[in-house]
Image (tube, rainbow, N blue to C red):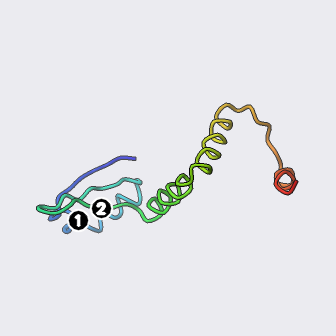
Amino acid sequence: MIYDSTNLTQASVNLAKLCDQVVDDRDVVIINRPNSENVALIAADELESLMETAHLLSSPKNAIRLLTALQESNQKTLKPQSVSELHQALLG
């Protein structure tokens, strides 16, 4: 993800263009505001994805499970399974 920045005046003048840039390029634009905290302009679906990831990783048990699955996937040691095989494995 690429971060760009602009000041509040330029952001307000170019808001439509900035919105298109954020959505089209999956960029995040930091808007620097004088005498106030900066804010970020981010595509709504990117924010939703980040929040969902944070939620899934907020439980230590779930985080370990997900990270273990990611490691196993990256090692490519697991054999592919069909949906019915996965369903059976979950139901016992």
**Taking 86 as reference, is 48 above or below it?**
below
Relative to the observer, which residue lies in front, 25 or 7?
7
Relative to the observer, which residue lies in front, 53 or 29?
53
Which residue in the protein does label 2 denote? 18
Dot label at residue 53: none
**Taking 34 as reference, is 86 above or below it?**
above
Residue at the spot x=63%, y=36% of the render? 71
- Secondary structure under the numbered disc 2 in the rendered image: helix
Relative to the observer, which residue lies in front, 85 or 9?
85
Left or right: 63 in relation to 28: right
Residue contact between numbered discs 2 and 1, judged by CB atoms under 8 Å: yes
Q: CA distance from mark 2 to mark 1?
A: 6 Å
Which residue in the protein does label 1 denote? 14
Residue at the spot x=40%, y=53% of the render? 25
Residue at the spot x=61%, y=44% of the render? 64
Image x and y of residue 21, in percent: 34, 58
Q: Residue furthest front?
A: 60
Image x and y of residue 16, in percent: 29, 68
What is the three-letter code of the residue carrying label 2? Leu
What is the three-letter code of the residue carrying label 1? Asn
**Taking 91 as reference, is 74 above or below it?**
above
Image x and y of residue 83, in percent: 82, 54
Q: What is the crowding at mark 2: few (fewer than 14 residues within 10 Å), some, or many (at least 20)?
A: many
